[in-house]
Amino acid sequence: MTSAQATTVQLAERRPRLTGEEMLASLVPPPQFRGATFETYRADDAYPSQQESKELLQRFATHGSAPLARGGLFSFGRKNKRPAEMKPGVYLDGGFGVGKTHLLASIYHAVPARRKYFGSFIEYTALVGALGYKNTVDLLTGSALLCIDEFELDDPGDTMVMTRLLAELVRTGTRLAATSNTPPNALGEGRFAAQDFLREIQSMSDSFETIRIDGVDYRQRSLAGGAVVTDPDDYESALVSIDGTASDDDFDALISHLAQVHPSRYIRLVEGIDLVGLRGVRQLTDQSEALRFVAFVDRVYDAQIPMRATGAALSDVFSDEMLDGGYRKKYLRAVSRLIASTHA
């Protein structure tokens, strides 16, 4: 049955614009975590580090009297350890699916401040790219908290820019909370992420307390499947039956258009969209195109927009060479999100 309210648009025809203030206003937890609290976080009793993390982060968020402990991964609670002053930053280390983003959003909601921001690593680097480093520092200076989801370690240039930015903000009183983006099948299931992080941001290592969160990695199971490929007839039906607005783009046309839109504006590109439709999906061979598509997928996933696509499976959009390369973490995360979005 066709919905009387169905509307179809093309993303490739949109030319979104965002001011610096609008970019800042968009730095909030994604829809699925806008109501996340410590109370709604369900720790798995089989993994005590989850409950311990929750308790530590509650104290961090509320400036509790019991400070975080120094020394190694999860030193809190060990005997003969003298509590030290609370560090200005916490870094949540662990694989996919253990609740890091939920806890990060819980920190955001619990910190009693007007000026606080929540975004992915890519969103912050896109902000610097769009506004310039000095303007970004000026806009963020005076904020009480910066939450950085999925801190990227595969781009040394971006990592160093963020290191410099965070160091300047910490000096002016901003507190930091970050998560790792370790893929589910990485060696040690993410146990090396903390060492990588501290090595890459060595000038900031004293500002962060690393908290290891163990748990069942449910996203690894989702990677075992694949993205749904929609039959052309079913694709047409999906577009006209949506109660709202669907986008309908040729895959190559969208990929070309993404090169003309700054990644910081991708959030506005999918604004008001209830279903993303792509025709003629193919495997990408250009790294720049692939990385822009990753940033686009992040915005679609954060907005919880389902996807329907014809052609090749979206889970096969990145070549084996890309998945084995330096941006492997980004591509694996995008594959997981594409699978979830086509099943939604």
Image: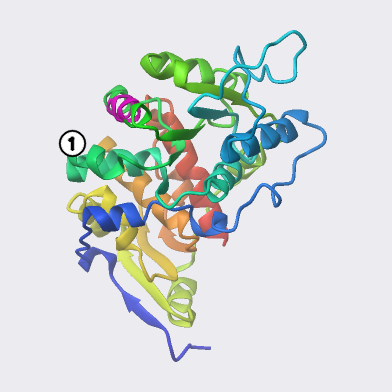
Residue 43 rendering spot, x and y as whole percentages: 75, 41
245, above or below 210, in the image? below
Q: Nearer the viewer, residue 131 or 308?
A: 131
* Residue pictured at 48% horizontal, 44% vertical: 335
Residue 213 lies, with reference to residue 69, above or below; the image says below
Image point (39%, 73%), residue name: 246
Q: Is residue 238 left or right of residue 36?
A: left
Return the x and y of residue 22 as percentages of the image width and height.
28, 58
Q: Residue 225, image x and y in percent?
A: 60, 46
Q: Is 72 above or below relative to 62?
A: above
Is-magenta flag for residue 296?
A: no
The image shows a total of numbered marks equal to: 1
Q: On the rendered image, what quadrant is the C terminus found in? A: bottom right
Q: Is residue 227 visible?
A: yes
- Report helix, strand or loop for mark 1: helix
Q: Is residue 164 magenta?
A: yes
Residue at image position (30%, 62%) is: 269
| Left or right of 213 on screen, residue 79 | right
- Tell me if I can see residue 289 in this picture: no
Residue at the far top in the pictured view: 80
Does 70 sit above or below residue 86?
Answer: above
Question: Which stretch did the figure color magenta?
Answer: 161-168
**Quadrant housing residue 174:** top left
- Residue 98 appears at what percent x and percent y? 65, 38
Look at label 1 and name its amino acid.
Lys
306 relative to 221 in the view: left or right: left
Residue assigned mark 1: 134
- Seen from the viewer's position, the closer of residues 114 and 105 is 114
